[in-house]
Amino acid sequence: MTERHVIISSLAAIAMMVTLHAQAPQTERVPGAVQTSSVQMTGEVMWVQGDWLAARMQPDGHFSLFHVQPGREFVIDGQTRHIGDLKAGTVVTATVTTRTQSVTLRTTTSLAGTVWYAQGNYVILTLQTGENKAYTVPESYKFTVEGKPASVNELKPGMKVTATKIVEEPETEFSMSTVVTGKAPK
């Protein structure tokens, strides 16, 4: 293979990658409003066994049983402790902070094709892969034909078009953090 063929083949491969990359869906994460709330619970440790802690809740005096995750740290009298270090009579306060954020995942896909059929707001395009795909689009949607915007009603078989499809999916992200502090009995 001559040097010229290698250069031409390399340029063709790069052009194909750029074309494929331009048509690959692009997803962006659009953050929305953040809501934060905190709740405090206070209780006196009655007993600890393994990963379980029983506490008499304040101020109402009811008992609650908690399964404590391994590794959970408590700050008792300013020092880091673990569940096995807690003694009956220790008063603990858990502050649970919840953060909620709405997020929109916006996926943008560009495509190019040839109009195979168009009627009303329904169009069938023959894509560059040779595959026919049907689309129902709003009347306000604009395709690009020869560099100019065209509505679905203006499309005719054989026209070369490009289009951009945007899909938005709402999601909600949650995160929670808990800080437990306390005072050991004297």
Image: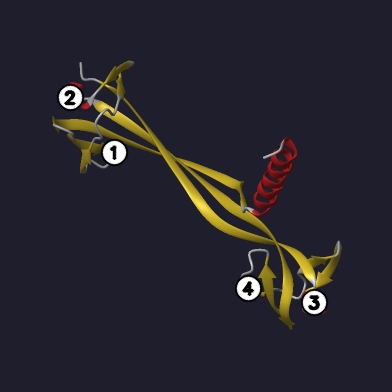
Which of label 2 and label 3 is nearer to you? 3
Query: Disc 4 marks which residue?
Result: 132
Q: Which residue is mark 1?
A: 59
Taking 171 as reference, is 4 above or below it?
above
The three-letter code of the residue at mark 4 reads Asn
The answer to whether residue 103 is visible is yes
Amino acid, disc 3: Leu
Along the polypeptide, which appears first: circle 2 or circle 1? 1
Tell me the quadrant of the picture where the N terminus can be found: top right
The image quadrant of residue 64 is: top left
Between discs 2 and 3, the one toward the N terminus: 2
Q: Residue shown at 63%/64% (left/top)?
A: 129
Q: Kindly indicate whether the residue at mark 1 contacts the one at mark 2 (C-beta within 8 angstroms).
A: no
Tell me where residue 113 appears, x and y as whole percent.
Answer: 72, 67
**Count of marks, rendered view:** 4
Badge 2 density bin: few <14, some 14–19, many ≥20, Cα 10 Å: few
Residue displayed at 32% across by 31% down:
93
Identify the residue under disc 3. 155
Q: Which residue is mark 2?
A: 84
Judge depth for marks 2 and 4 and give the one in front: 4
Does the CB distance between marks 2 and 3 fall below 8 Å? no
